[in-house]
Image: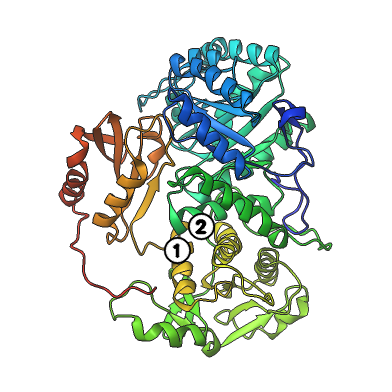
Amino acid sequence: MKYCSSVWNYSRRLSREVVIGDLARGGVIIGGAHPVVRQSMLTCDTMDTAECVRQTLELASVGCQLVRITAPTVKDAANLEAIATELRQRGCWVPLVADIHFKPEAAMEAVKWVEKVRVNPGNYADRKKFAVREYTDSEYESELRRVEDQFTPLVLEAKRLGRALRIGTNHGSLSDRIMNRYGDSPLGMVESALEFVRICRQNDFHAIVFSMKSSNPKVMIECYRLLAARLDELGPDWNYPLHLGVTEAGEGEDGRIKSAIGIGSLLADGIGDTIRVSLTEDSPREITVCRDLLQNLPELCNAKTPLPEIGVPWDTFNFQRRHAAESALGETKGGGEQTVRVVVTQATYEKVAPRISPGADVKPEAIYEELNLLELDPLRVETLDSIPCDTQWVTVADSVPLPPITAFRLLATRLHQAGRHNPILLKDCLSFPSVPWTPDAALLRSAVNIGSLLADGVGDAILVRNESGAGQSLRLAYNILQAAGCRSFKTDYVACPSCGRTLFNLQEVTARIKVRTQHLKGVKIAIMGCIVNGPGEMADADFGYVGGAPNKINLYVGKSPVRFNIPEAEAVDRLVDLIREHGKWVEPTAVAAVV
């Protein structure tokens, strides 16, 4: 199977066009040759019409092209009429999308008033109880018929009214039926979505957009690759557009890096028609990151000049780190079973070294100019003849006229063809602009380039040079490794971006939890505003802080609830107690940070 036409030569996946809203009044077309559509979501109560209108107008003013609004009940869905009416009276025709979980009756109400409805196959017609059971083939078919009975009325109503549907599966929120047959896997996510799309196709309805979201960028990339390949296998008329996003990415640098890795990697391969960057911040900031990412992508995509079509030597649907020989790297070792190392330039080392304490987790591990490093041109096969042995570190020479993703993929492929297992140093850039990148652009470009390659399993050490600030470049390198799942040097947070279902102030609570727990290296904490995103979508988190009712918090260990209805004022303390009970707590120490 192939997930894109070429991993070397850029070509955007050809998807069918789906019209959302009235094109004469601000509607958009997703797919085809149209530009990638930017979208975001409201964070307020859906019953607060005035605030929904205000937030929508604010999003539209900064370039948001689709606005999603949660509709947890039929009452909320009915209020979408008032929201849409007020917006249209004010001259705002940005299409609205209703976000539906658990309640088909809410979807049937919402489809009357908005241009698009998102449903989650994991909870639209199925119940999720984390139950383990075996389904016979006949029982499984019976369940599919029940799903069809529940979903078909919405399909027919959407077709009658000219609406669109997003079939959006999320890692961790698959139904028990899918989980028991396929596991919590990319394959399960794809099959869950395809079940619903087959029902659409039975009714000759094709205004469909897919999404496959996860808080883990590597899982997200695998899901979309598998979906694109499966759709291509099913035939040319299955070319539905794809909405990209890393769900519950968090805030700040971490949220931006995770999103850049997941979304950027796929866009660079020509996959994706609409995007959302899910941040635990005010929604307009998501659109800023969307715009910055899209503006920087053209230079980061695969080669525009023809390269030979050769197969990559790794499984593009199942992550596995490339095998490399272990070898000395400065005063440490890399490759083999060693973690991915961080290399800095001499100039960066001289600036940051005096500020780093002996016990610091964020520190340079080798100096670029001091390495016995062989810089190669993967376009010239004969340059591999200069490699003396498998323990020789190699990288791509700065002079190579290729985007970094393409260049390092080609280097890894050439090494494989030659039977070589040399460790590879990844660079985030192979050329430098006349004016340094802004910090925002540097972060996104470095995360896309290095993160995409790490998600392919390529890379044994990394060098960040897009960011001109010494301390910032070192921190960025470690944050990219953490976001890509290669190293854990600090607490990892999975935080949803807030919506009308949220039962507490996510930004404030996330900040309080970080103050108490950000020193816990190797611990993953999920902060979820409601039961929709927790516990299922917490996926592989160690501990969860989940809104259970107004001003009440439930605490989880993994996916298991262990404390219920804790007053919000006490919940952070109880979370710390829970971490301590499970042997994951250590007292914070005063270690100098690189800034």
Cα distance between the residues tagged 2 and 1: 8 Å
Disc 1 residue type?
Answer: Asn
Extreme residue toward the right, this view: 306
Look at 73% across and 73% down and name the residue there.
378
Label 1 environment density (alpha carbons within 10 Å; few <14, some 14–19, many ≥20): many
- Position of residue 173 measured from the top left corner of the image (x, y, whole percent): 44, 32
Q: What x and y, as percent, mark residue 229?
A: 68, 40
**Residue placed at 80% from the left, 61% from the top?**
304
Q: Quadrant of the C terminus?
A: bottom left
The mark found on residue 463 in the picture is: none
Q: Would you say residue 188 is visible in this rendering? A: no
| Image location (x, y in percent) of residue 560 | 28, 35
- Side of 23 where 118 appears, left or right: left
Q: Residues within 10 Å of mark 2 (few under 14, many from 20)?
A: many
Q: Is residue 517 left or right of residue 473?
A: left
Q: Quick check: 110 above or below 303? A: above
Nearest to the observer: residue 77 or residue 153: 77
In terms of sequence position, does the residue under pointer 2 or pointer 1 come before the other?
2
* Image quadrant in which the N terminus is located: top right
Mark 1 lies on residue: 479
Single out the residue that lies furthest toward the bottom: 370
The residue type indicated by label 2 comes to Ile
* Label drawn at residue 257: 2
Could you say which quadrant of the image residue 401 lies in?
A: bottom right
Element on which disc 1 rests: helix
Can residue 137 be spotted in the picture?
A: yes
Measured along the vertical axis of the image, is residue 280 above or below residue 293? above
Tell me if residue 141 comes above or below residue 165 in the rendering: above
Q: Secondary structure at mark 2?
A: helix
CB within 8 Å, label 2 to label 1: yes
Looking at the picture, tell me which residue is in the foreground, 403 or 27.
27
**Quadrant of the rendered image containing residue 365:** bottom left
